Amino acid sequence: MNIIISNTSDKPIYQQIFEQVSAQIVKGELERDFCLPPIRTVAKQLRISVITVKKAWEELEHRGFIYTMVGKGCFVAPLLPGERASKRDELVAEKLKKDIEYYKGLGLTLPELIELIRRYYGS
Amino acid sequence: MELLSVHNLNKKYEKFALKNVSFSLEKGYIMGFVGRNGAGKTTTLKTMLNLVHADGGTVSFLGKDYFSDELACKQKIGLMFGDIFYYPKQRLRTITNVVKRFYNEWDDAAYEGYLARFDLDPEKKVEKLSTGMKVKYSLALALSHHAQLLILDEPTSGLDPVSRDDMLELFQELIEGGETSILFSTQITSDLEKCADFITYIKDGAIIASTEKDEFLDSYKILKGSGERLTNDLRHKLIGCKENSLGFSGLVKTTDLRGSTGLEVSAADIESIMIYYEKGRAE
C-alpha cells in the first residue's frame, strides 16, 4: 500500500488518503482481505493526526472499500470484478461532475470538451 | 476512554483570571494548547496540576478526582515546564537520582534509552548544557516513569528544526499504543498542524475552542476582496479585519460564508486564526 501526502495541495489530507487507497483497491493492487496497517501506525508514518487517518478509513468503510473486524483491524473488501468496476465508475463520476461544472463555466460545449479530451488524453 | 477532564477551572489573580476553563482529552491523542503570551496557558497547566491552588473547578484524571488524589495521579503524569531550573553545578546523574525516587514506576532502561536518543551525557553538569539540551533532559525525566499523560509546556521552543522534528516523531511514537496522551502548549503552531489531534485555544483566560484540529481548521476561512466589497453586513461577520488601500482580508466562520461569492476564500491555518482572533472583531 502506498500513500503520498501533499502538504501544498488544497485537498484535505483525509481526502488524499481516501483517493489513493480507494484507487489501489479498484485497480486490484490491494487484494481482497489485505490487512491495512493500524491507524496509529499510519498516522505516525505519515506524520499526521490519528483522527485524520481514522476519518479516511471511516470513509473507505462507509463506501464499501474496506471492512472492519473488531480487535483485528481493517481489511480490503472482497469485491467481485464487476463491483470493482462499478465502484471505480462511482469515483470517476464524482470527479467528472465537478470538472464538467468547471468546463461549463468556461462555456465549453460537449463536442468541444470531447475533442479536448481526445487531444490531451495521451499526453 | 477519557483520560483527563478539566471542568470550570477558575483562578483569580489581581490582574488576570482563568474563567471557567474546561476541556477534556481521551487516551491516545495529542492535544495542542495555544494562545498568546499571557493568555493563561501556563496558569491553566499549573492550576490543574495544583501547583497553584484553584479557586474553583474540578480536574479528573483516569476517573479519579485529581485534587483529592494528587499523589497517585502524579505517578501517572509526566511534567515538563520551561521555567524549571536545575542546580547548575550538579551533574545530570545526580539530579536524576533525586527525581527517580519520587516515582514508583521509574524505568532506568527507558531513561538510559532517552539519554542515548537525545545524545545526553549523564556526567555533564547542567550549566554546560545548551538550551536545547536542557529541554531534552527535562523530557527524558518526564518520560521515564511510564506516565499516561504528558503535560509539556513549550517542549519544542528552543529546539532547532531537526530536533523539533525528532521530538514530534517521538510524540507520535508515544501515543501509537493508544494508552498515552500528550497535552502540550506551544507557539510554534506548524508543529501542531502536523501531529495534533485536538486543539485547545485560550484567550484572556477563557477557552475559545477545544475541538478536533481538522474541525477547528475547517470552521474558519480567510476572506479577501477589494475594499468596496466590504459591506457592513460582511464587516459584522468578520473576526478581525485588515484593511488597506489595496483591499481587505479577514477571518470568517465557515457557517457565515454564504453570500460571499466573488470574494477570494482560502483555508485558514492555526496561526492565521489566532492572528485574526486576537485583532478582535472589526468595529
Image (tube, rainbow, N blue to C red):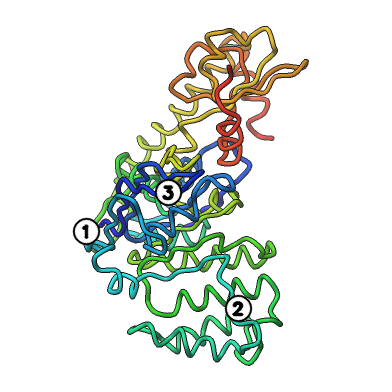
Callout 2: chain: B
For residue B118, the mark is 2
* Coordinates of residue A2 in the picture (x, y in percent): 51, 56
A23 to the left or right of B48:
right
Residue at numbered disc 1:
A70
- The vertical placement of B280 against A115, above or below, is below
Q: Helix or strand or loop: what does disc 2 sit on?
A: loop
Q: Which quadrant: the C terminus of chain B?
A: top right
Say which of marks 3 and 1 sits in front. 3
For the residues bearing labels 1 and 2, Cβ distance under 8 angstroms:
no
Camera-nearest residue between A63 and B80: B80
- Which residue is drawn at the image coordinates 40% and 88% (left, top)? B101
Q: Amino acid at mark 2?
A: Phe
- Rendering quarter of residue B106: bottom left
Q: Nearer the viewer, residue A13 or B11?
A: B11
Q: Which numbered disc, 1 or 2, marks the residue closer to the eye?
A: 2
Q: Secondary structure at mark 3?
A: strand
Query: Above or below — where is B145 with respect to B223?
Result: below
Q: CA distance from mark 1 to mark 2?
A: 38 Å
Q: Earlier in the sequence, mark 2 or mark 3?
A: 2
Q: What chain does badge 3 belong to?
A: B
Task: Indicate the position of residue B50 as horizontal and vertical percent values.
Answer: 37, 62
Q: Disc 3 designates what residue?
A: B198
Name the residue located 27 percent from the left edge and 56 percent from the top edge.
B2
